[in-house]
Image: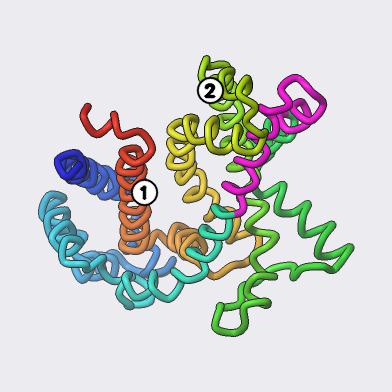
């Protein structure tokens, strides 16, 4: 078990190195000059050159990358070109909103999707099965921002059940915090529900066709234990895999959802930084998101060992 975890940990190092090179190269090869944007439309060439020198943009690419990489290893993600504040501080100021949105979305999506997938497999071929799969296909096809605007229009503007937009810290009250997360969580989680529900149904159907499942039915095992203890447990590996993959959907969807619902999270920080070509913020956030995604996939790999002990010996 320890050897398996160590191999996975060592595999994280080259992945993060490739991510760092890609992020730094992509942003610096993009057209446009942040120094010219900071200087303004009426700036002279001398002013732009002075700003480039102060930002270190006139140094060789390799030198910039090595300095940036060394800073990242020390936890220094750089300084914003416009606000002058450390990027780590800007991320820390907004991390609560993003973590709250992502966590609530994941909880709602996983519970709802697994339940729907199990029910669809149990009633395969029935009206319930077709309805669940229809919702899954629709949820995966409709963009997040469309779902968000529809929810706002009907549930906020028409029925006035939830706030139209904004975010309240959990310290201001649990109920107010939850009310502001209901709509964005469902808007972001619909595609996630669709993905997990389809995989859950497929995996459950494969397990339920096994001989030991027929034996359990013949022995009179009740429906709930049959589905949960026998079928779902043995179908868990593909489900856990797709949950880990779905984190990528959350990361990309957070940016859109926070813009639609005006949530002051990391996604909004990225959007603002892109419009101003604030390289340090974009690089810092992308590295943080990539690190979170890699760590979650590492956690999924470790979880495999507890679900199926045979994996640790591969």
How far is mark 1 from mark 2, CA to CA? Answer: 26 Å
Q: Is residue 261 above or below residue 175?
A: above
The residue carrying mark 1 is 296
Q: Is residue 226 above or below residue 167?
A: above
Within the image, what quadrant is residue 25 found in?
Answer: top left
Q: Classify mark 2: helix, strand or loop.
A: helix
Measured as percent of width and height from the top left, residue 149 is found at 74, 54
**Left or right, 274 with reference to 19:** right
Q: In the image, what residue occupies the spot 30% across and 45% down?
A: 298
The residue carrying mark 2 is 207
Q: Is residue 124 magenta?
A: yes
Q: Classify mark 1: helix, strand or loop.
A: helix
Within the image, what quadrant is residue 63 found in?
Answer: bottom left
Determine if residue 191 is in view: no
Q: In the image, what residue occupies the spot 45% across and 60% down?
A: 270
* Nearer to the camera, 299 or 231: 231
* Nearer to the camera, 185 or 108: 108
| Mark 1 burial class by Cα count in 10 Å: few <14, some 14-19, many 20+ | some
Measured as percent of width and height from the top left, residue 232 is found at 54, 34
**Left or right, 190 with reference to 252:** right
Q: Is residue 20 above or below residue 141?
A: below
Observer-side mark, 1 or 2, equals: 2
Which residues lie in the magenta part? 108-133
| Mark 2 burial class by Cα count in 10 Å: few <14, some 14-19, many 20+ | some
Measured as percent of width and height from the top left, residue 297 is found at 35, 43
Query: For residue 187, which numbered disc appears in the image?
Result: none
């Amino acid at each position: 078990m320890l050897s398996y975890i160590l191999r996975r940990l060592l595999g994280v190092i080259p992945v993060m190195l490739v991510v760092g090179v890609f992020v730094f190269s992509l942003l610096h090869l993009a057209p446009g000059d942040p120094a010219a944007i900071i200087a303004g439309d009426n700036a002279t060439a001398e002013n732009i050159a002075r700003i480039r020198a102060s930002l270190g943009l006139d140094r060789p690419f390799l030198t910039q990358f090595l300095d940036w990489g060394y800073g990242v290893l020390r936890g220094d993600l750089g300084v914003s070109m416009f606000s002058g504040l450390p990027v780590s501080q800007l991320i820390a100021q907004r991390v609560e909103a993003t973590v709250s949105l992502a966590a609530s979305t994941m909880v709602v999506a996983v519970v709802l999707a697994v339940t729907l997938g199990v029910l669809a497999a149990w009633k395969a071929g029935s009206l319930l099965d077709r309805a669940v799969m229809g919702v899954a296909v629709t949820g995966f096809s409709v963009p997040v921002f469309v779902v968000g605007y529809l929810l706002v229009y009907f549930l906020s503007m028409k029925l006035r059940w939830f706030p139209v937009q904004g975010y309240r810290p959990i310290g201001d009250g649990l109920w107010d915090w939850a009310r502001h997360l209901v709509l964005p969580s469902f808007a972001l989680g619909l595609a996630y529900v669709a993905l997990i529900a389809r995989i859950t149904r497929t995996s459950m159907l494969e397990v339920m066709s096994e001989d030991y499942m027929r034996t359990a039915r013949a022995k009179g095992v009740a429906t709930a234990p049959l589905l949960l203890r026998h079928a779902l447990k043995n179908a868990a590996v593909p489900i856990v895999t797709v949950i880990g993959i779905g984190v990528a959907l959350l990361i990309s969807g957070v940016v859109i959802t926070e813009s639609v619902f005006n949530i002051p999270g990391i996604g909004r920080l990225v959007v603002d930084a892109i419009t101003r070509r604030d390289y340090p913020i974009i690089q810092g956030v992308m590295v943080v998101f990539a690190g979170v995604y890699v760590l979650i996939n590492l956690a999924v790999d470790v979880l495999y060992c507890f679900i199926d002990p045979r994996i640790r010996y591969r």
